[in-house]
Image (tube, rainbow, N blue to C red):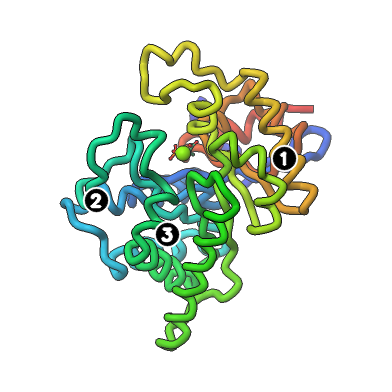
Amino acid sequence: KTRNLERLKGKENITQSGQKIDICANIGNREDIENVIRSDAGGIGLFRSEFLYMENGGKLPTEEQQFQTYKLAAESMGIKRVVIRTADLGGEKQAACFEIGPEKNPSMGYRGIRVSLEKEDMFKTQLRAILRASVYGNVAIMFPMISTVEEVRSAKLLLERAKKELSAEKTAYNKEIQVGVMIETPAAVMISGELAREVDFFSIGTNDLLQFTLGMDRENERMEKYFDPHHPAILKMLRIVANNVHLEEKPISICGDMAADLSLTEFFLQIGIDELSVAPGQVLALRKKIREIQ
Ligand code: PEP
Ligand code: MG
């Protein structure tokens, strides 16, 4: 079976009737970069940068350390795009180098972009590292856990400040770097039209979107059987986001676990999802599914 899938390497992600969709891969550690290359994915659709903070012996990763890792990913992927998500710390992603302190409800607490916007220095260090790496390949930046337009504007402002610093230092970076946001709160779904006027691209984080829409902890094993990606509310939300974003002529991807659910591939194609980003090991099975669809 694996050998059959191997034969799909180098082939297009295209349905029988000619509809195309991109397949990218998610990475959550340095070693995954190799897995992505072997997977024949069209790029890295979600670079979960948290691992740099969680696996660094309790110390914050320096700009240089981060730069080296982002550069490696960018260079390894060549012309293929690498979407680096800024640190999504907090919630179920606790890092020893960054004490958040006890919270009654960490997944609905101090996390993601909220942390980044309060810890400006830490955030700017990461943005500088990403910008510096952007000249070594096709790098884009994505902000996690967005729930307001103001968060996006503040994050973009800090990005501009990081760019100014680098320019003043005569350090190279891609001045046209693309900026995207994750749609993973119901609020972001409802304001996706407004968000589409602020950024270049979108990716739906269905793991958190399910958690917040269904009101079920994504880590709670007792909830597993109720944690239903086929829930009509979820499917409706995906359709709404795709419409809103496409009205502004911006692309939309899905990077949550749901992207690899082959019983939903046809639905994703129907609503015009532009890209699915899945674990490296799931790329070829998804390609096979797409190529079988009418
Ligand atoms: C998601 O929430 O679906 C997502 C892709 O991000 P993470 O799983 O890292 O929270
Ligand atoms: Mg998430």
Camera-side residue of 120 and 246: 120
Circle 3 packing at 10 Å, graded few (<14), some (14-19), many (20+), is many
Q: Residue at x 16, y 52 (%)?
A: 57
Residue 178's quadrant in the figure? bottom right
Give the labeled residue for mark 2.
Answer: 98
> Above or below — where is 170 with respect to 111?
below
Mark 1 and mark 2 lie on one chain; the one further toward the N terminus is 2
Dot 1 amino acid type = Ala
Residue 255's quadrant in the figure? top right
Q: Position of residue 155 (x, y in %)?
A: 50, 61
Residue 162 in the figure: left or right of residue 102: right
Q: How far is the residue under mark 3 from the one under mark 2?
A: 24 Å
Dot 3 amino acid type = Ala
Q: Residue at x 37, y 24 (%)?
A: 219
Q: Using the rendered image of the protein, determine whether residue 155 is visible from the camera's viewpoint.
A: yes
Residue 245 in the figure: left or right of residue 47: right
Mark 3 and mark 2 lie on one chain; the one further toward the N terminus is 3
Give the labeled residue for mark 1.
Answer: 242
Circle 2 packing at 10 Å, graded few (<14), some (14-19), many (20+), is some
Q: How far is the residue under mark 3 from the one under mark 1?
A: 28 Å
Camera-side residue of 121 and 54: 121
